Image (tube, helix red, strand yellow):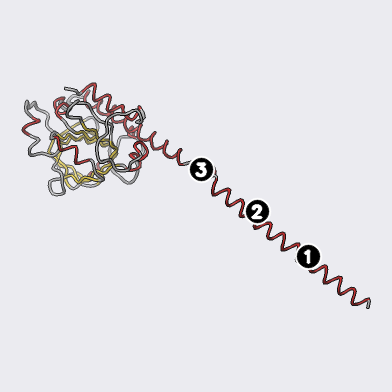
Amino acid sequence: MRKISVIVICLLLVMTFLTISSLAENNTLAISKTISNIEAKEPSSNPISIQGKRQQAINKASERVTGAVSLVKEINAGLYPIPKYMYNNARVMIVVSSYKRFGEKSGDEAGRGIAVARDPKTRQWSAPIFVTVKDGYIKDQTEPRDINDQFSDSETTMVFFGIHENAKNMFCKEETDLGNLAGVLVSSGIFQYRKHVGESAALSVGLFGYVYSRQLIIGISIENSTIRQDQVLNEAVYETKVLEQFLQPAPFIPKPILAYTDSSNKLFIT
């Protein structure tokens, strides 16, 4: 009888231990699940919040605009500036560069920059569309030069002007091919005075091109290159990855983003 009592007590102890272990395990699982739910819902657990990433992109966009302002001023202060009548007759203007002052890259592009267009009625310049350039080659008086290599080996800027009113529509889409064979014809930018450049050249030339590097600038044509809208920066600034039209300055656009617009309106308004 005494032996049976001992066995019963042992069984009760084993069952109690198993019950406690099961409860502890369930409690641990419940706590783990609760923690997982909190981590999933808590935005501060991410190193950078969504809002923080957007602000970073806006800062990058502002730096790019500031770089474009200073770079164009530097070009125009040089010995052989781009003729002012090119700016005054332009309907669209694109500046892409590998200069450090344009900020960090957004991807694997060769150069990054902006495009602005002029309102035909007010003659005022638009807010910038952010763009990148990649691939293709530069043609000038020397041997053709790969654009990716040129932008990688030396700080380089390309400036394009579209004289025809329809030229600005070329850049209101995800990407635009440049080159006589690939898409939009890019003719070597001119320096000599032409009174009717807006009338004579616009009919046969899509864009005029210039390249600036090591404080020297020459006219260039382009083949097999692509200009794309920078969807990361466009989305951060305008909440739209691909802009289908150039936007006029508006209160919702951060003021630093309009620095190139304001500068162009002061300098190139005729």
**Residue in view at x 9 percent, y 35 percent:** 202
- The numbered mark at residue 31 is 2
Task: Classify residue 100 by image quadrant.
Answer: top left
Q: Which circle's residue, 3 or 1, is located before the other in the chain?
A: 1
Q: Which circle's residue, 1 or 2, is located before the other in the chain?
A: 1
Circle 1 SS class: helix
Residue on which disc 1 sits: 17
Amino acid type, mark 3: Pro
Circle 3 SS class: loop
Circle 2 SS class: helix
**Residue in view at x 63 percent, y 54 percent:** 32
Residue on which disc 3 sits: 47
Disc 3 crowd, CA 10 A, few/some/many (<14, 14-19, 20+)? few
Q: Position of residue 152 (x, y in %)?
A: 29, 42
Q: Is residue 65 above or below residue 138?
A: above
Residue in front for this viewpoint, 218 or 205: 205
